[in-house]
Image (cartoon, grey):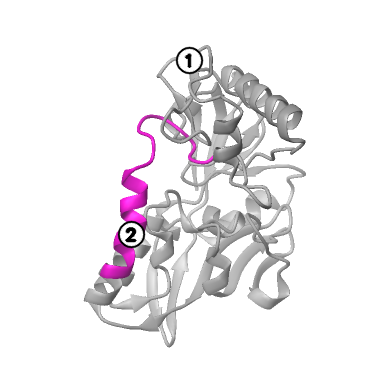
Amino acid sequence: MRMISSVCATDVTSMHCGGTIECIYEPENPGELAEIIKDLDDFHILGGGSNTLFEDTTITRPIIRLSHEFNWIIPVPGGARVGAATPMKRLVSYCTKNALSGIEFMAGIPGLLGGAISMNAGTPDMGIMDIIDAIEVVDRSGVHTIARNDLRYGYRTGGIASKTVIISATLTLRKSTKDLVRLAVRPFLEKKRKQPKGFSSGSIFRNPEGMPAGLLIERAGLKGLRVGGAKVSEVHANFIINDCHATTSDIRKLISLIKERVKTLFGIELSEEVRIIGQ
């Protein structure tokens, strides 16, 4: 097992802000992972860092990141079995090259498979849990396989129990042709290309029922609103952009201002997608 000390949060998150992580544990197999977590009352699993912020302090909370040994794809009848540390970009590319259909809607979504499953990432109409057959997890009692139907997943939640780490998943995919898969992937990549540029965590808020969060924020007149080095994007209002000088404190204050204004004007309580990890 690898242990990395004094890691700058700016180096492991897509928002590029935060303090120093005292130690990141990188298990190389399920046994090492089980050994780490069996005695821990609290820990955080860090994936690609696209949906995580760390406070502007020294993070003493145990942080675990699966090593490259969990980055793999194995074909199986009716789909593929995939390690949790596999980047979504690699998985979509694999499916395209092998003419496997079903995952096209995940094209352009950043991060790793484990994080995508944990938050049921996807589009407003479909989440990755819709194509999951089963997941393999490690908790304090060992390694388990959980069928999708045994999980209470929903919009932006995979229904994974706390203190449970996803290590792999079996995806249900359909045989197609390379050309058809490429054609289906294209509109999702085009949408990604139109998103705001710069350091961000993607969508900051979940979409409340009835109206996209970005539209609510835009109608509240908050595009361009700035706190320190953090600014509401003028391209898409559900993105907060770090101009390279933002602190996590700046971003938290901006999130609070957005929530207060939207609540006052529309009576709607926005809920964050992004997770802010403290000590």
Q: Nearer the viewer, residue 1 or 56?
A: 56
**How many residues crowd mark 2 within 10 Å: few (<14), some (14–19), many (20+)?**
some
Query: Three-letter amino acid code at disc 2?
Result: Pro
Where is residue 77, by image quadrant? bottom left
Left or right for 79, reference 35: left
Looking at the image, tell me whether mark 2 or mark 1 is earlier in sequence order. 2
Q: Residue 111, labelled with which disc?
A: none
The structure residue drawn at horizontal position 46% and vertical position 45%, both measured from the top left corner, is 48
Residue contact between numbered discs 2 and 1, judged by CB atoms under 8 Å:
no
Query: Three-letter amino acid code at disc 1?
Result: Gly
Q: Nearer the viewer, residue 5 or 228?
A: 228
Magenta-colored stretch includes residue 60: no
| Viewer can see residue 8 | no
The structure residue drawn at horizontal position 44% and vertical position 86%, both measured from the top left corner, is 78
Residue corresponding to mark 1: 229
Image location of residue 244, percent across then percent down: 40, 19
Task: State which region is magenta.
Answer: 183-203
